[in-house]
Amino acid sequence: MIDGNQELGSQKLYVQPTAGVKTRVKLDDLLGQFQGKNVVINRAELVLTNISTDEDYFFQPYNLSLQVVSGDGNSTYYTPDDASYTSSSYFGGIYDEKTGEYRFRITNYVQSLLKAGEIKDQGLNIVTAGAGIRGNRLVFRGTDENFSDHFRLEVYYTEY
């Protein structure tokens, strides 16, 4: 949503370092899908596809990071899946040149959202890692499902 207009993020979303732009993701729809169900999240991945057309001038970031927005909305912290707690090979966020994608494994975060009251969804900020020293930016596909490479959360789960 940009200035109250949710349609503006349907085709393109942005991340730019320093005092630039971050994208906030809320998973409200996910919570509604699993409401009243007993599920175990086997794997949850947030997938972003690079659609930048000006890489000659603005290189895509080597890696991105996620920040959980705190319950009061005034501070951020790392997801329980973050590379600082696990490893970068588990968490992801590194640019894959073959697919043009960034993938974040946020399984523990999603499971914690679904457990009653464990985490309140104030959103995740997608930011450029090393934002204070690099000027790399990213334009990535928005949420419009008419694009096969749309921004999405892939969830694999078991219902019991």
Image: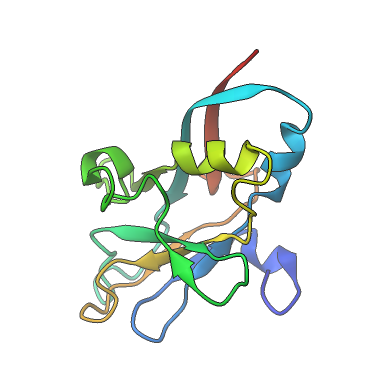
**Residue that appears at 54% across and 31% down:** 155
User: Which residue is at 42% across, 82% downward?
Assistant: 20
Corner quadrant of residue 146: top right
In-front residue for pair 130/110: 110
Foreground pick, 148 / 135: 135
**Residue 60's spot in the image, x, y percent?**
29, 64
Residue nearer the viewer, 109 or 66: 109
Q: Quadrant of residue 104?
A: top left
Residue beneath the point at 24% across and 71% down:
130
Please state if 46 lies on the left or on the right of 40 as rendered: left
Q: Position of residue 57 (x, y in %)?
A: 26, 77
The quadrant of the image that shows the N terminus is bottom right
Considering every residue shown, the one lying at the far top of the view is 160
Instruction: Classify 36 as above or below 82.
Output: above
Picture layout, residue 78 above or below residue 81? below
Q: Is residue 96 above or below residue 53?
A: above
Q: Position of residue 23 (x, y in %)?
A: 52, 67
Seen in the image, is 56 located left or right of residue 66? left
Position of the C terminus, as image quadrant, is top right
The residue at the point 54 percent across, 65 percent down is: 69
- In this image, 107 relative to 3: left or right? left
